[in-house]
């Protein structure tokens, strides 16, 4: 809040997925409005590519020595392999997407919002808990288990989960 210009300074880091999600949603909505396309359908089509991108980015993080896990005494190696956790999350999301897509029981846009829901939960609960990120507000670190709470992603996860849940409910109202 002291320096609002830092918000747009992408060269100083940030929440890459959350910014990418926001940018992709807004830009795809504008594009669909201009081209008179069905925006929710386009969102659903993007899910497999996003999931594959998560898998490949986390593999690249291994080679670049990025997204390091917290040190731990619990495992036979020094750090949690958070890049592998992230790749497995991407694979799980791809499988969940394929399962839901084959059921064809959901309104257009639902697959995308289910993806946001499950990715937010899995990343927030698994990858981010073991990832060596700075803690926001108050925090807790257990050096034996190699876990840490609460990073910025932990704090944003409930917001994205609620948004995704609300969108899913809005698209697929319960029939009573």
Image (tube, rainbow, N blue to C red):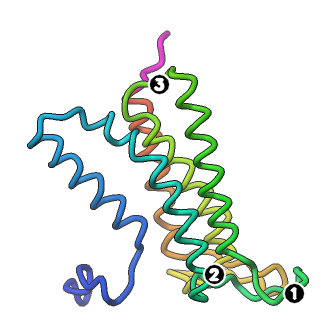
The answer to whether residue 104 is above or below residue 161 is above
Q: Main secondary structure of the magenta part?
A: loop
| Magenta region | 172-176
> Across the whole image, how many numbered discs are drawn on residues?
3
Q: Secondary structure at mark 3?
A: loop
Foreground disc of the pair 1, 2:
2
Q: Image quadrant of residue 159? A: bottom left
The answer to which of 75 and 46 lies nearer the viewer is 46
The disc, 3 or 2, on the residue closer to the chain's N-terminal end is: 2
Marks 3/2: CA distance?
Answer: 36 Å
Report which residue position mark 2 lands on: 62
**Left or right of 12 in this view: 162:** right
The quadrant in which the N terminus is found is bottom left
Q: Residue furthest top?
A: 176
At horizontal 53% and vertical 30% (from top left) the residue drawn is 101
Report which residue position mark 1 lands on: 73
Marks 1/2: CA distance?
Answer: 21 Å
Report which residue position mark 3 lands on: 106
Mark 3 neighbour density, 10 Å: few (under 14) some (14–19) many (20 or more): few
Mark 1 neighbour density, 10 Å: few (under 14) some (14–19) many (20 or more): few
């Amino acid at each position: 809040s002291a320096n609002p210009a830092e918000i747009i300074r992408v060269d100083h880091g940030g929440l890459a997925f959350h910014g990418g999600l926001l940018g992709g949603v807004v830009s795809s909505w504008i594009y669909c409005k201009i081209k008179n396309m069905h925006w929710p359908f386009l969102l659903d089509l993007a899910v497999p590519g996003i999931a594959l991108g998560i898998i490949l980015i986390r593999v690249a993080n291994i080679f670049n020595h990025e997204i390091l896990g917290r040190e731990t005494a619990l495992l036979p190696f020094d750090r949690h392999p958070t890049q592998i956790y992230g790749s497995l999350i991407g694979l799980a999301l791809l499988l969940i997407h394929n399962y839901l897509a084959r059921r064809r029981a959901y309104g257009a846009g639902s697959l995308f919002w289910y993806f946001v829901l499950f990715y937010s939960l899995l990343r927030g609960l698994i990858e981010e808990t073991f990832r060596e990120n700075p803690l926001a507000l108050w925090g807790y670190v257990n050096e034996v288990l190699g876990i840490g709470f609460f990073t910025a992603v932990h704090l944003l996860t409930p917001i994205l989960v609620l948004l995704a849940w609300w969108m899913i409910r809005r698209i697929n109202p319960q029939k009573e």
